[in-house]
Amino acid sequence: MIGAYGWADSLGLNRPLDAAVSTTALHCLSEPVLLRTYRQLAALLRPGGVLVNGDHFAQDGPPRSDLTAQVGRRRAERARTHAHEDWQSWWTAAAQCPELADLFTEREQRQAAHGNHGGNGNAVTLVRHTELLRRAGFDHITPVWQFGDSHVLYAVKD
């Protein structure tokens, strides 16, 4: 599990990587675990290697968060997908399935052990992700795409 101690070593890589790509895998990590994960990713990359992280990033302050949430709702309405199940509803329904009970127990234990937020939203803002990436050894950090609170963040290893 990404963010867990030793996850990078378990990949068994024998050379530095040119790029690492993550999509909606890091948003529920706590700040300390996220910083450690960014440092581990930096260690896997060659100098000049890139990290591309597509995820949902919290905005600084309620006015911005409210605006990005409204953009998402309006887009869903225009696309006629607003009646579909949202992320939280999906997890709630899945947690009610008896066949998945053991997996959910394991998931909760792992999240607690690693300081994760349980997938209930992202507490780490885009600005803070950028700061943590800099501390982990990345430079030239910029969002290259955004829609609402969804971003693709690009970072180059120093």
Image: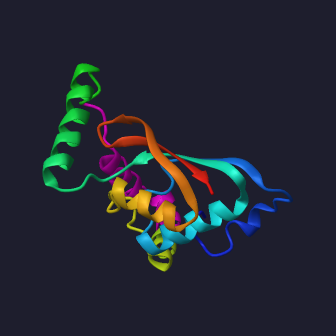
Find residue 107 and report its horizontal and vertical position in percent.
50, 67
> Which residue appears farthest toward the bottom when viewing the image?
113
The residue lying at 50 percent from left, 75 percent from top is 114
Find residue 53 and report its horizontal and vertical position in percent.
52, 47
Whether the magenta-drawn stretch holds residue 147 is answered as: no
Looking at the magenta stretch, what is its main secondary structure? helix
The residue lying at 60 percent from left, 64 percent from top is 1
**Where is 69 relative to 6, above or below?**
above
Find residue 63 and report its horizontal and vertical position in percent.
13, 49
Find residue 24 and report its horizontal and vertical position in percent.
48, 48
Say if residue 106 shows up in the picture. Answer: no
Image-quadrant location for residue 124 = bottom left
> Which is nearer the eye, 41 or 133?
133
Position of 61 with respect to 22 (left or right) is left
Q: Tell me where the magenta segment starts and ends, as one range.
A: 83-104
Position of 21 with respect to 35 (left or right) is right
Say if residue 74 shows up in the picture. Answer: yes
